[in-house]
Image (cartoon, grey):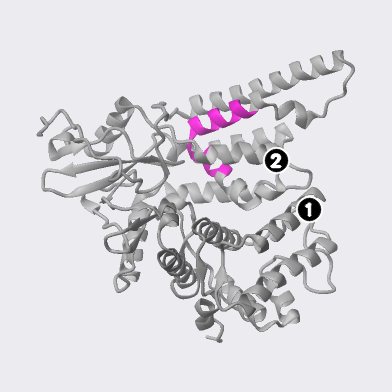
Amino acid sequence: MTSSPDETKLDHIGPDEIRPVSGQPIAADARAVAVPSGRVSRLARMGGLAAQVAGSAMVGGVQALSQGHRPQLRDLLLTPANARRLTAELARMRGAAMKLGQLMSMESGALLPQELSQILSRLRAEADFMPPKQLRQVLDAVWGEGWRRQFSRFDVRPMAAASIGQVHRAQLRDGRDLAIKVQYPGVARSIDSDVANLGSLLRASRLLPRGFDIAPYLEEARRQLHEEVDYAREGRCLAEFAAQLEDQPRFLVPEFHPDWSTGAVLAMSYARGRPVEDAQTAPQEVRDRVMRDLMALMLQELFEFGLMQSDPNFANYLFDRESAAIVLLDFGATRQLAPQVVAQYRALLRAGMSGDAAALTAAAADLGLVAPDGMADAGTMRADHQRRVLVMITQVFDVLRTSESYDFADPSLLQQMQAEGLALAEEGMVPPAVPMDVLFIQRKLAGMVLLAGRLGARVPVRALLSPYLEDT
């Protein structure tokens, strides 16, 4: 089947072939929803959302008072209807709204009110996309109106969508099979105002727990968004990872195509593979190998590259059954790690695996996880909470130090950690102000642990850590 220059249609591809190349997979019921691109329209939508939530709370409060009840403000704000409003509107805004939701839910989900955590979790899963007309307008602006004549096929329905852009499959007339990430219009120029407006909304809503400082998350969302909207930067990170891993056939990285890439469009080779979660039905040795390789890569990123793809979303990994290789996707969240933080993690690792309690406390304090022994509390974190955090860290290292191979199918340790984390949250523990590098490393680690549990993998963690226990 051929297409005319003005008809950029993609021939039918079976469901086993279409896989996301970055971002959240597009669900069958996902909608084509235009992204508000002007600053004024985005500000108006944010203000309208605040008014709707406040109005709903006021009506609910009057009704409760008329029935003799004195409701809490949080109960009035976090109604099911308001949760739906918040999720739908923030998802439609994309950009800063979705990015802040991802950061807060990943880093502090256990410390936020359950209702707000649920809103943010649902926000991460939203995957609406631009309608074809808006997509054409964006591509006409960056490629020129004659771009369609260079393609034999272009699928206007994206394979995946995320907070910054959406991904389409296409084929050039020269035969190249591409995945093309297209940035949502208005996201880049609205970052600062979006972040400021969203922060004001959250502070005014009183949805956050007392003592929770949202300022670092707002600043990090702003900084990260400015990096992620620079698709030229992502292209360089993609090429850097490809170069770092060129002698490791167990990993496949899409090829960067700079001739069709701009600051707002990223072109790369189309990557075939199955979602990595599908490996949970594979033989045990396959599941073990997948997680061993991914955890080994995470340690390489931390201790050798000093460069980490910090987003552990499962959609960023595919498994190619033919080559038995893992396909690595989406390098927008690639982060250059501070050498000091890398050295501090190495010290924490050495202390934990040697069982040196004093050294472990000092290393955890250097990273900002707790205060040095005998000193005042770190920030707003109580001394008894710090002691319990140290106990949790020690328990994890005790298990890793004494296990030849850790079975992630056994949920007992993770459940123990989650139960203690929930107990600390219910007691009002506020997380310490640690360096953002630490938060992103912890997020990557948590994502790997969750994936290993999903696959039921057995991983020789102690052997993987061994090369990094010596001084450099």
Q: Name the side, left or right, on which 33 lies relative to 451.
A: left
Q: Disc 1 on helix, strand or loop?
A: helix
Q: Position of residue 263 (x, y in %)?
A: 33, 47
- What type is the residue that disc 2 sits on? Gln
Q: Which residue is mark 1?
A: 423
- The magenta region covers 83-101
Q: Is residue 89 magenta?
A: yes
Residue sitting nearer the eye, 44 or 267? 267
Residue sitting nearer the eye, 55 or 110? 110
- Measure the C-alpha gap from mark 2 to mark 1: 13 Å
Identify whether 73 is placed above or below 407.
above
Q: Disc 2 on helix, strand or loop?
A: helix
Q: Position of residue 217 (x, y in %)?
A: 62, 49
Give the residue at x 82% y 64%: 377
- What type is the residue that disc 1 sits on? Ala
Q: Main secondary structure of the magenta part?
A: helix
Q: Residues within 10 Å of mark 1 (few under 14, many from 20)?
A: some
